[in-house]
Amino acid sequence: MRIPPITRRTECVKIRIGYGLGTQGLGHAPGDGSGYAQLVDDLERLSFDSVWFSERLTGNAPDPGALMAFTAGRTKKLKMGMSVMVLPGRSPVLVAKELASIALLAGPGRLLPAFGLGAADPREHQAFGVKREDRGAIFNESLEVIRRLWREDDVTHHGRFFTFDNLRIGPSLPRPLDVWLGGIAPSELRRVGRLADGWLPSFITPTEAPELKARVIAAAAEAEREIEADHFGVLIVYTSGAPLGGPFLERIRSRRPDVTDPSELFPVGLPALRAHISRFIDAGYTKFVLLPAADLAGQPGGITEELERVAAEVLTLEHD
């Protein structure tokens, strides 16, 4: 399937900053959900742009679809996205139906779908019921089906993994949802260019950001597409206190062994976080998702004080 070209907007790009929890969730929050309620209430009150929920079936974080539905019903303006929802192992028809339903109930422009292949973890592959070697092919076909179901009234699809005849789902949306993808491997950058409306990678440095963005733009041009100027973002893991060591640094090194200075990936302290975001803005990135390295439920002052400190330091970087 050839994805239609995106029409580039002519107005100035908007810098927007959101917040997420990563796969840790609110590890030590009360089991009644009050921690998540406090999180989304605070994010809306402080005028963060969005909240992002990650997925790990074998982890503590709740399902991102359930969290987005919860957020949509509790807030008025806060956008919500997944960082990311795993497609291989899910029915693309059910995903299309679920997200269209949340988008309709939440209101225009509030749902930001972001999809991925899933963690490189054998337990996750077993939980989703997908072989590692099949993930990429299933992902590509699933995304094609989802986008067709959002764009077309009647879908017939005969593929390697899915077969449908004259399939139609509702509710209908005024316009299809923008789809964000991540990843920095060459194959992932090509997939972003071919299929995505926006790019939201993690564990990249401000230094390499211009080149990686240029490669996505080139891949989109090859597919006769454009990605809007304000649809390039990045997830940034940070800590507002002392540097974390041990397992956390080892995880960073395992993800990016080629980066010798961890501060290029992981700002320590809120002034460093602001400077880090500013460097990405200079590189042409406009959407940011901040992820705390430490469990917010265990932080001094809890969720509210941490978010207030972050908001005071970085939200003045936002502009239209």
Image: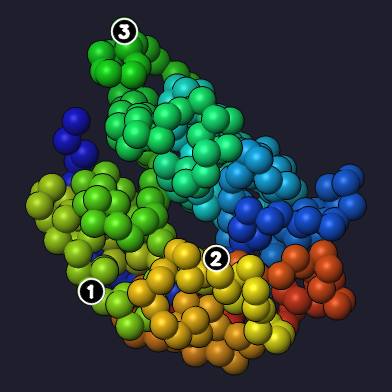
Say if mark 3 contacts mark 1, CB within 8 Å.
no
Q: Secondary structure at mark 1?
A: helix
Front label number (2 vs 1): 2
Write down the residue under mark 2.
Answer: 251
- The spot of residue 302 in percent (x, y) is 84, 71
* Residue occupying the point 58% across, 80% down: 315
Q: Tag 2: Cα neighbours inside 10 Å, few (<14), some, or many (≥20)? A: few
Please state which amino acid type lies under the numbered disc 2: Arg
N-term-proximal mark, 3 vs 1:
3
Residue 165 is marked as 3
Give the vertical position of 48 relative to 84 (above or below).
below
C-alpha separation, residue under disc 3 versus residue under disc 1: 42 Å
| Residue 281 visible in the displayed image | no
* Residue occupying the point 58% across, 30% down: 127
- The spot of residue 26 in percent (x, y) is 76, 57
Please state which amino acid type lies under the numbered disc 3: Asp
Residue 57 is marked as none
The coloring applied to the image is: rainbow
Please state which amino acid type lies under the numbered disc 1: Glu
N-term-proximal mark, 2 vs 3:
3
* Residue occupying the point 33% across, 60% down: 184
Write down the residue under mark 1.
Answer: 211
